Image (cartoon, rainbow, N blue to C red):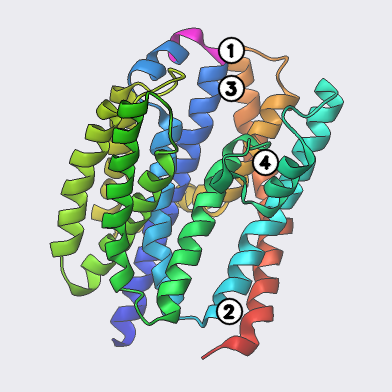
Amino acid sequence: MGAAGVVDRSKRITFLEGVRGIAAAAVVIQHLFAENFAGYRAWTHDHVDLGRVGVVAFFLVSGYVIPLSLAGQTLPAFAIRRYFRLYPVYWLAFGIFVVVELVDRGSLAGATLPVIVLNVLMLHGLLGAVSLLPPAWTLSIELLYYVQSAAAKARRLLDASVHLGWAWLAFYLLLCIGERVTGKDFPTTLPMLLFVASLGHAIHLRDAVGRRVCDAMLVAGAIVVPLGAYIGVDGDGEWPPFTYSSSFLAGLALFGAFYLLRGRGMARPLIFLGGISYAVYLMHPILMEVFRGLHGFVSVGVNAAAVLVLAYLMHRFVEKPSIDVGRRASARFKR
């Protein structure tokens, strides 16, 4: 592939940082505005949820980059690097959140010993346990996608595993039908997001081998996910079908816009925000708890400024050193 291949890969990574940056900002904006403005809370419930837009974009990024990473790493190296990439920052954020909750409220809602253990292991989202650190429910689904991709790599079926997306999409639709038949809520978002990750994988393969699978999955998802939202039953009233559908499609559009610009450089503020996006995602609910006495635009401004500072410090002094430790620890497992 030569020097041109190196440049292309660098551009792809830069484009992903741009997506991460906007996705992280979308999640924070959603939570801050929904918390502080009743009018926005009503509007977002009925129209589009920026937090879900960001989550869909994040899973597309994971689907795009994880097979790219696995293709160039052994399985032990991949596992070590993912561990040091995810867990140290998460554990610190989780610990801070627990302390803040205990100091401010005197208790940790829903925190039985099994729930705490599942949260510490980052498995709570797979088993339906409450996410004590609110946005961390998605991390369990990310882990499942890592395991799926690693298992495919072990069987030399990494590229072929993109077709598991069809199974996840079918499972999503089946659960939606089950909701309609039984009148009960099922965990439909889990297979939906695993399908989204598979779509991200298909987009990565589109760059390498062509567009057929990617385009077919994109069209199928754009039809089936909204269809399932309207078939299913929103028992708690949190996700009206239109909002579920529009947020999903907006997440695809966000990623797609950056994908179309992947050959261009990204603005430095976007790259910066993308670099600290994991810390932003984990830390912003902690700061919202710390500053819950503030209201309106004062709350939005203070929280936004504080999360940028704290996320940068977390990235600089915890996340980045941890990633470096993972790289050194995995060096012995190079090809």
Q: Amino acid at mark 2?
A: Ala
Which mark, by number, is residue 309? 4
Identity of the residue drawn at 54% across and 26% down? 31
Identity of the residue drawn at 23% across and 45% down? 221
Give the labeled residue for mark 3.
Answer: 300
Q: Are marks 3 and 1 in contact (CB under 8 Å)?
A: yes
In the image, residue 305 above or below residue 146: above
Question: Judging from the image, what secondary structure is the residue with disc 2 in?
Answer: helix
Q: Residues within 10 Å of mark 4 (few under 14, many from 20)?
A: some
Q: Earlier in the sequence, mark 2 or mark 3?
A: 2
Q: In this picture, which residue range is highlighted in magenta? A: 36-40
Q: Amino acid at mark 3?
A: Val
Q: Label 2, label 3: how many angstroms apart (C-alpha)?
A: 40 Å
Q: Label 2, label 4: how many angstroms apart (C-alpha)?
A: 31 Å
Q: Label 4, label 1: how many angstroms apart (C-alpha)?
A: 21 Å
Residue 216: % across, % down: 15, 55
Question: Judging from the image, what secondary structure is the residue with disc 4 in?
Answer: helix
Say which of marks 4 and 1 sits in front: 1
Question: Judging from the image, what secondary structure is the residue with disc 3 in?
Answer: helix
Secondary structure mostly seen in magenta is helix
Give the labeled residue for mark 2.
Answer: 77
In the image, residue 222 above or below residue 231: below
Residue 237: % across, % down: 43, 17
Q: Amino acid at mark 4?
A: Val
Residue 106 horizontal side relative to residue 114, left or right: right
Q: Are marks 2 and 1 in contact (CB under 8 Å)?
A: no
Q: Residues within 10 Å of mark 3 (few under 14, many from 20)?
A: many
Give the labeled residue for mark 1.
Answer: 296
